[in-house]
Image: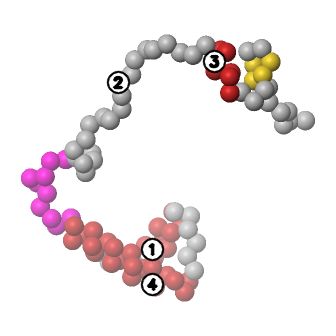
């Protein structure tokens, strides 16, 4: 599939890309080559290939989600740099 210079500039404008005039001819050729390759791929017979969402045969690899006991306030605040009661003290950054 060939692409015209006008079509390339239209797509560039839609994508908000600025294309230097000296590069337009080269980009038009390159995009045309890409579209021709995609057209070649579209000719492959894929009717016997089942649809996939991933190239590897994997299922959800996450652990089972379940309730478990959480840490207490004192245990959570052991690594806090500075604290006052149940609060973490941080430096003031807004004047």
Checking the image for residue 75, the label placed there is 3
Going 64% across and 21% down the picture, which residue do you hit? 76
Q: Looking at the rendering, which quadrant does residue 65 occupy? A: top left
Q: Earlier in the sequence, mark 1 or mark 2?
A: 1
Tell me: residue 4, above or below residue 76: below
* 21 left or right, relative to 6: right
For the C terminus, the image quarter is top right
- Closest to the camera, between mark 1 and mark 2, is 2
Q: Looking at the rendering, which quadrant does residue 84 occupy? A: top right
Question: Where residue 93 sits: x, y (%)?
Answer: 84, 37
> Which residue in the structure is indicated by mark 2?
64
> Which residue in the structure is indicated by mark 1?
8
Secondary structure at badge 3 equals: helix
Q: Earlier in the sequence, mark 4 or mark 1?
A: 1
Question: Where residue 94 sits: x, y (%)?
Answer: 86, 36
In magenta, the rendered stretch is 42-51
- Closest to the camera, between mark 2 and mark 4, is 2
Task: Please identify the dominant SS of the magenta region.
Answer: loop
Checking the image for residue 26, the label placed there is 4
Spot the residue most to the left: 48
């Amino acid at each position: 599939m060939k692409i015209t210079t006008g079509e390339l500039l239209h797509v560039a404008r839609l994508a908000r890309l600025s294309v230097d005039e000296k590069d337009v001819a080269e980009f038009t050729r390159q995009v045309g080559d890409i579209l021709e390759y995609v057209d070649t791929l579209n000719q492959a017979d894929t009717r016997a290939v089942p649809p996939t969402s991933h190239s590897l045969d994997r299922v959800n690899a996450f652990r089972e989600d379940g309730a478990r006991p959480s840490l207490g306030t004192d245990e959570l605040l052991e690594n806090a740099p500075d604290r006052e009661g149940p609060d973490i003290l941080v430096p003031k950054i807004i004047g």
